[in-house]
Image (cartoon, helix red, strand yellow):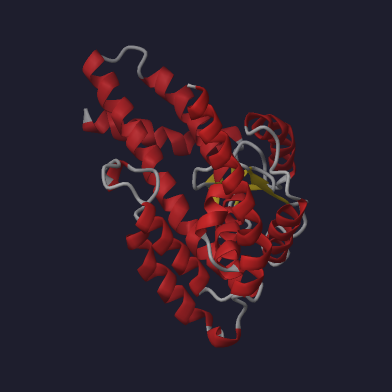
Amino acid sequence: MIKKLLLILILGSVFCVFSGGCVTNAVTGESEFNIYGNDMDDDVRLGEAWAPELEKEFGGVFEDEHIQSYVDYVGQNVAQVSHGAHIPWHFRVLRDKMMNAFALPGGYIYITTGMLRKLETEAQLAGILAHEASHVTLRHSTNRMSEQMGFNILFSAAMRNASGEMVRAASIASQLVMLKYSREDEMEADVIGLRYAMRAGYNPYGMVETMQILEAERNDDGPAEFLSSHPSPMNRYGRLLEEIEAGGYNVAEMKVRKEDYERIVLERLKDVKDEDEDENKKKNHKH
């Protein structure tokens, strides 16, 4: 059984070679399987197609133009020193109480008002946006999509005459492989994102501080770390600190901008939070 499972995984490499889907990652220089080609043109088209639908699900982007402009300004600072400076970037705020930030392929980055409320400085915001921007430049989304498509084809062919036990074992193996890649993606995005933030002049400890914020918010009853798609923030500190030391920057002179963040984001979000609470009180009163 083990030999058959290994054969399935090896076939993935063969599929990559014969399909012409192997490309060189512009950030890492490594060869990887991506059916969307070497450049990011298709990634951009995917982002353009998906962004309107995603924003529609959130009721449109957050209506505060000052906060939107500020987040885009910080994001563009990071994007222009990234490996994707040649593509159009879009940094947008979504009104949602959940702490979240994510990226679509091709330069569409989103952060929620729930996440913005938890941050304290522009450096922290830059750290999160840089992390998400690195997912774009590393092409993690289209890489994973390509791998999943290739694996599905191989899995179906290899399992055609397999026993039920074999199918179940291979299915579990495939899921663990995908989760492993996802954890590696997150760690890779930490390092590359930190470099982008530092190149843009931001104090790199802003990203470390966001890890501490995420750790404080982490649900103790959540899934076991080994089967989680994101590594524990605690396990990411060490790698970030090593990268900061290797960067050779005079950290004390780098941008933090706590006052700007408080004035432009936190003060304005106070009104938004109060409106949400008033609406909830009205709903509860009606019931």
- Please indicate, yes or no, whether residue 102 appears anywhere in the rendered image: no
User: Compared with residue 284, is residue 229 higher up or lower down, i.e. above or below?
Assistant: below
Q: Is residue 147 left or right of residue 180?
A: right
User: Compared with residue 263, is residue 12 higher up or lower down, i.e. above or below?
Assistant: above
User: Compared with residue 215, is residue 105 higher up or lower down, i.e. above or below?
Assistant: above
Residue at horizontal 64 percent and vertical 76 percent from the top: 201
User: Which quadrant holds the N terminus?
Assistant: top left
Q: Is residue 56 left or right of residue 19?
A: right
At which x and y percent is residue 151? 45, 29
Residue at horizontal 48 percent and vertical 77 percent from the top: 244
Question: What is the count of numbered marks?
Answer: 0
The answer to which of 167 and 20 lies nearer the viewer is: 167
Residue at horizontal 32 percent and vertical 46 percent from the top: 219
The answer to which of 194 and 168 lies nearer the viewer is: 194
Residue at horizontal 29 percent and vertical 29 percent from the top: 172
At which x and y percent is residue 164? 25, 14
At which x and y percent is residue 210? 47, 62
- Which residue is at the far front? 285
At which x and y percent is residue 59? 67, 32
- Please indicate, yes or no, whether residue 230 appears anywhere in the rendered image: yes
User: What is the quadrant of residue 155 in the picture?
Assistant: top left
Q: Is residue 238 left or right of residue 2?
A: right
User: Compared with residue 268, is residue 14 higher up or lower down, i.e. above or below?
Assistant: above
User: What is the quadrant of residue 45 in the picture?
Assistant: top right
